[in-house]
Amino acid sequence: MHRFIFKIEQVLGFRFPIPEKWRWQLSISSEVAFWDNYYRTKGGDWKNKYQLKFDPNLEVQPNISKYFPSSANLKILDVGAGPMTFLGKIFSGQKINITATDPLADQYDEVLGKYEIDPLVRTIKCHGEKLDGMFDESTFDVVLAKNSIDHSYDPVKVIVNMIKLTKDKVILIHAENEADNESWYGLHQWNFFVENGDFIISGRQTKVNFSAKYKNVVHIDSFIDEIDGLLYVVMTKKNSFK
């Protein structure tokens, strides 16, 4: 049904007035199907990186770890992690404590079970919009997300929750303008981009200058990485929300 609705929208150039959460729910099956194919084919178009998810001695990716604080027993939260976190498990010679969350964790567990896969870090079910109800403020040293927050139904709320839960840094890694790139299909309903140096979140009917709105809470660096071409948004926490 969701494919039919979205195709009509594309043909007519008209967007039905469906609440964002309903639109998100209509797109769940396509996301689960993507991951089912990923594990069935052992990586699909990303076979060269597939085995890295199963390596307990993989170092945290250097483009991420350079933002980590220098402290022992790091606690990291991966938001929208999918079936298995992409993050390496070792930092400065020590195993890090990773918590992974995703609203579709139950469906992903079924996919992993289907292919008899036991992940190094089991993703737990939680909507990013409800993270503040699952964890206490300042629980984690770093809270990060890769290619996931622009798939949510309220990305501003998700990122605000991420800021609440971190002691130090929030790291976002996403394709720029993914909604435009994917013709606003399925879960791709939000564009993330940099405008005049500010981090912007834009949907069909809303546009939020996140840098300006939350400048008293976080310092934000936004840039396109020269190596992978992705948009990096690094937030350093200054103050707690009142």
Image (cartoon, rainbow, N blue to C red):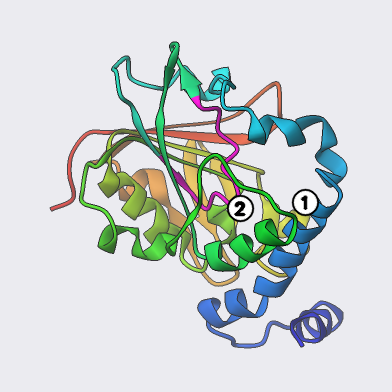
Magenta segment, prevailing SS (helix, strand or loop): loop
User: Which dot marks residue 83?
Assistant: 2
Residue 4 visible in the snapshot: yes
The one nearer the camera, 9 or 105, is 105
The one nearer the camera, 39 or 234, is 39
User: How far across and down, in percent of the image, does residue 186 sit?
Assistant: 71, 70
Taking the magenta stretch, the answer to whether it contains residue 82 is yes
User: How far across and down, in percent of the image, does residue 225 sit?
Assistant: 63, 26
Q: Residue at coordinates 61% horizontally, 47% vertically from top-left? A: 118
Q: Residues within 10 Å of mark 1 (few under 14, many from 20)?
A: some
Kind of residue sitting beneath label 2: Pro
Do tag 2 and tag 1 residues touch (Cβ < 8 Å)? Answer: yes
Report the magenta residues as a range. 77-89
Q: Distance from label 2 to label 1 (Cα)?
A: 10 Å
Q: Residue at coordinates 68% horizontally, 22% vertically from top-left? A: 226
Residue 185 visible in the snapshot: no
Residue for badge 1: 39
Q: Secondary structure at mark 1?
A: helix
Q: Residue at coordinates 82% horizontally, 57% vertically from top-left? A: 37
Quadrant that contains the N terminus: bottom right
Taking the magenta stretch, the answer to whether it contains residue 10 is no
Q: Residue at coordinates 56% horizontally, 65% vertically from top-left? A: 104
Drawn side of residue 31 relative to residue 209, left or right: right
Q: Earlier in the sequence, mark 2 or mark 1?
A: 1
User: How far across and down, in percent of the image, does residue 219 sit?
Assistant: 32, 33
Kind of residue sitting beneath label 1: Tyr
The one nearer the camera, 176 or 23, is 23
